[in-house]
Image: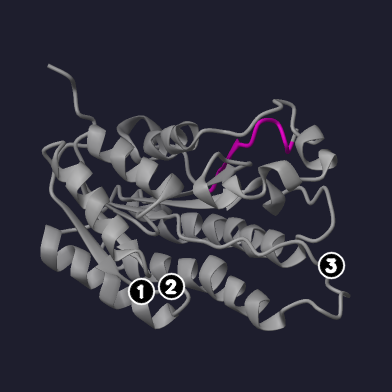
C-alpha cells in the first residue's frame, strides 16, 4: 500500500484551474490531501480539474475568487474551512506576468502594472494573513515566486520582478511571526515553465533569456510542483523562511 504523506490534510491552491496550479493540486491529491482550488474566470476548466481530483479519491472543490482584490481572501479561506472542515496547507500560486516594456517607455500600461501588484503581491499577502488565523500548529504556507525576484537579468521586467521580490521579504517575516506555532512559510522560485501562458512566447524570447539558464530548457510544471509538495510534507517541518529555486540555474 502506497503511503499517502498528506492524507487527512486540506490544501488550498490559488489559480488552480490551469498550469502549475493544476499540476500542484494533482500532486498534492496524489499524496492524499483534500483540495480546494480558486479561479477567477475559468469556471469550466476549474470544474474539470475538480473532476480529476475527485477521481483520485479525495474531496475537491473550486471557489471563484479574484486574487487582485485583497478583500476576497478572508471569504475564500472561510469557504475552504466551511466546505472541507479546515485548512492545513496554503499554496499561493495565482499570478500574472506582464513584462516587455521598460519603466521609461511612454506606452507602458501603468494600470496593468498596478493590477499586477494587486494580484502578485497584495493578494498573496492577504491570503497569508487570512490563512494564518485558521491554520493549525504545523501548517504550511508556500508561495510561488520567480527567479526574477532574485536576479533581474534583462530589462522590461521591473514591476514583475519587484512583485516577486516582495513576496520573499514578506514570507521571511511571516516565518518569524508564525514560527512559534511551527507553521512554515517558504517560497518556491520558478523559472521558465512549459505552460499554456508561455506557449505563445517560446519562439519570441530574446536569446539572452535562455542563455541565462544553466539548464537550457523550460521546466515542466510537475518539476516545480514536486518542490511545493515537498515543502507541504512531513520531511520539510524544519524548513522555513527559505527560498527554493527551481529555475534551471537562472540564479546561479
Q: Name the residue under label 1.
A: 73
Observer-nearest of 71 and 66: 66
Dot 2 falls on a residue whose secondary structure is helix
| Main secondary structure found in the magenta portion | loop
Instruction: Name which residue lies at 35% across and 41% down.
Output: 232
Residue density around tag 3, few if under 14, some if 14–19, many if 20 or more, within 10 Å: some
Magenta highlight on residue 138: no
Q: Residue 126 carries which label?
A: 2
Magenta highlight on residue 242: yes
Give the extent of the magenta segment: 241-251
Q: Quadrant of residue 93?
A: bottom left
Q: Mark 3 points at which residue?
A: 102
Observer-nearest of 144 and 65: 65
Quote the CA–CA distance across marks 1 and 2: 6 Å
* Residue 132 visible in the picture: no
Drawn side of residue 217 relative to residue 212, left or right? left
Quote the CA–CA distance across marks 3 and 1: 31 Å
Question: Residue 178: x and y, percent?
Answer: 41, 58
Observer-nearest of 140 and 115: 115
Q: Nearer the viewer, mark 2 or mark 3?
A: 3
Residue density around tag 2, few if under 14, some if 14–19, many if 20 or more, within 10 Å: some
48 in relation to 191, above or below: below
Contact flag, marks 1 and 2 (Cβ < 8 Å): yes
Observer-nearest of 118 and 125: 118
Residue density around tag 1, few if under 14, some if 14–19, many if 20 or more, within 10 Å: many
Question: Residue 43: x and y, percent?
Answer: 29, 65
Amino acid at each position: 500500500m502506497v503511503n499517502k504523506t498528506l492524507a487527512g490534510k486540506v490544501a488550498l491552491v490559488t489559480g488552480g484551474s490551469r498550469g502549475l496550479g493544476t499540476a500542484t493540486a494533482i500532486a498534492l491529491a496524489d499524496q492524499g490531501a483534500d483540495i480546494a482550488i480558486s479561479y477567477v474566470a475559468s469556471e469550466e476548466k476549474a470544474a474539470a480539474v475538480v473532476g480529476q481530483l475527485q477521481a483520485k479519491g479525495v474531496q475537491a472543490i473550486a471557489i471563484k475568487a479574484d486574487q487582485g482584490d485583497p478583500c476576497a481572501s478572508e471569504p475564500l479561506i472561510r469557504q475552504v474551512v466551511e466546505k472541507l472542515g479546515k485548512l492545513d496547507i496554503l499554496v499561493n500560486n495565482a499570478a500574472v506576468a506582464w513584462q516587455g516594456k521598460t519603466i521609461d517607455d511612454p506606452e507602458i500600461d501603468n494600470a496593468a502594472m498596478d493590477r499586477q501588484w494587486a494580484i502578485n503581491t497584495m493578494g498573496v499577502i492577504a491570503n497569508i494573513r487570512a490563512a494564518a488565523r485558521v491554520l493549525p500548529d504545523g501548517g504550511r504556507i508556500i508561495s510561488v515566486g520567480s527567479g526574477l525576484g532574485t536576479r533581474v537579468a534583462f530589462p522590461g521586467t521591473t514591476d514583475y520582478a519587484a512583485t516577486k521580490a516582495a513576496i520573499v521579504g514578506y514570507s521571511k517575516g511571516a516565518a518569524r511571526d508564525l514560527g512559534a506555532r511551527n507553521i512554515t512559510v517558504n517560497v518556491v522560485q520558478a523559472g521558465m515553465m512549459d505552460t499554456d501562458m508561455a506557449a505563445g512566447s517560446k519562439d519570441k524570447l530574446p536569446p539572452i533569456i535562455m542563455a541565462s539558464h544553466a539548464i537550457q530548457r523550460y521546466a515542466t510544471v510537475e518539476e516545480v510542483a514536486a518542490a511545493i509538495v515537498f515543502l507541504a510534507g512531513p520531511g520539510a517541518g524544519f524548513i522555513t523562511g527559505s527560498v527554493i529555486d527551481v529555475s534551471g540555474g537562472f540564479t546561479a
